[in-house]
Image: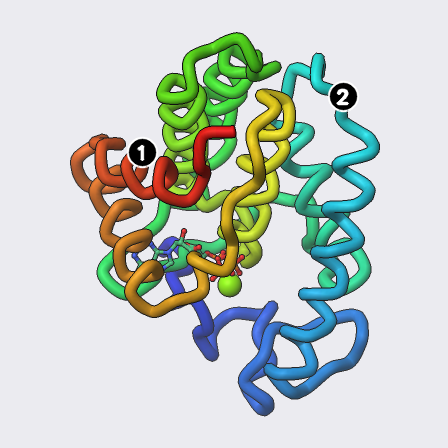
Amino acid sequence: MTASSNKYSANDPAFDAEHGVLKNMLGLTSEAALLHAESEALIAAYEEAALGYSELHTFTADDVCRLHKLFLGGIFEWAGMYRTIDISSPGIRWCHAQYIDQEMARFDTLLRAATPLSPNLPHDEIITKVAEIHGEFIAIHPFRDGNGRTGRMLANLMLMQAECPPFRMELFDTAEMQEKYFAAIRDVWANVDYTKLTRLFAELVPKP
Ligand SMILES: Nc1ncnc2c1ncn2[C@@H]1O[C@H](COP(=O)(O)OP(=O)(O)OP(=O)(O)O)[C@@H](O)[C@H]1O
Ligand SMILES: [Mg+2]
């Protein structure tokens, strides 16, 4: 039987059921402390990634693993490695673990074709490409956790290549925006339709 788990299931060996958090190398047992550590790690990862990837870099699936490890490598042993269990979020079952390798090979081809993202492209086209890459990545959901933040970091790195401003993250934080974002992701996942996600990203990334 395939191991199947909700995002935070008690059957998952990566999950600390006693404290209700993912087991971590820092020994943190509160969700707030873990989120705080992750936020600091994310900022450091952004700094390193922004310095490390040039505007001429062709991104690959290996880079995505590197970004995930840069972000969570000091916190989770599985950082940078694809998950081996099935997980779901409300209303969504993410890609079966056994198909992640092949789905990420397909994603690698898409990502190589889309990057480096040229500043000479029309703004609409830049946003469309970033939305398609982000939607595809989230639909695969290759990691045990941290897919959203890693995917948005990749999207911001692509925007940087295209000389666009980064996402206006403060808009991302409202409940209304999150519901719009989730609905857009569900449309990619269920219908392979990127329209809503592209429209949302256009709102979040004003023309330079
Ligand atoms: N109910 C849902 N409907 C649509 N998409 C969802 C839903 N729940 C999660 N997602 C997508 O999955 C991402 C969360 O995945 P994951 O928990 O692996 O990433 P994270 O970085 O830990 O979380 P977050 O993005 O919330 O900071 C969200 O950012 C969103 O893209
Ligand atoms: Mg998460």
Q: Residue at the spot x=40%, y=58% of the render? A: 87
Looking at the picture, the colour scheme in use is rainbow
Task: Give left or right: position of 106 versus 164.
Answer: left
Residue 191 horizontal/vertical position (percent) = 17, 35
Q: Amino acid at mark 1?
A: Thr
In the rendered image, the vertical position of residue 140 relative to residue 77, given as above or below: above
Question: Which image quadrant: the N terminus?
Answer: bottom left
- Label 2 and label 1: CA atoms lie apart by 25 Å
How many numbered dots are placed on residues in this image?
2
Q: Residue at the spot x=68%, y=65% of the render? A: 39
Q: Amino acid at mark 2?
A: Ser
Q: Residue at the spot x=52%, y=20% of the render? A: 111
Residue 159 horizontal/vertical position (percent) = 56, 29
Q: Residues within 10 Å of mark 1 (few under 14, many from 20)?
A: many
In the image, farthest residue toward the bottom: 18
Q: Residue at label 1?
A: 198
Q: Residue at the spot x=82%, y=34% of the render? A: 51
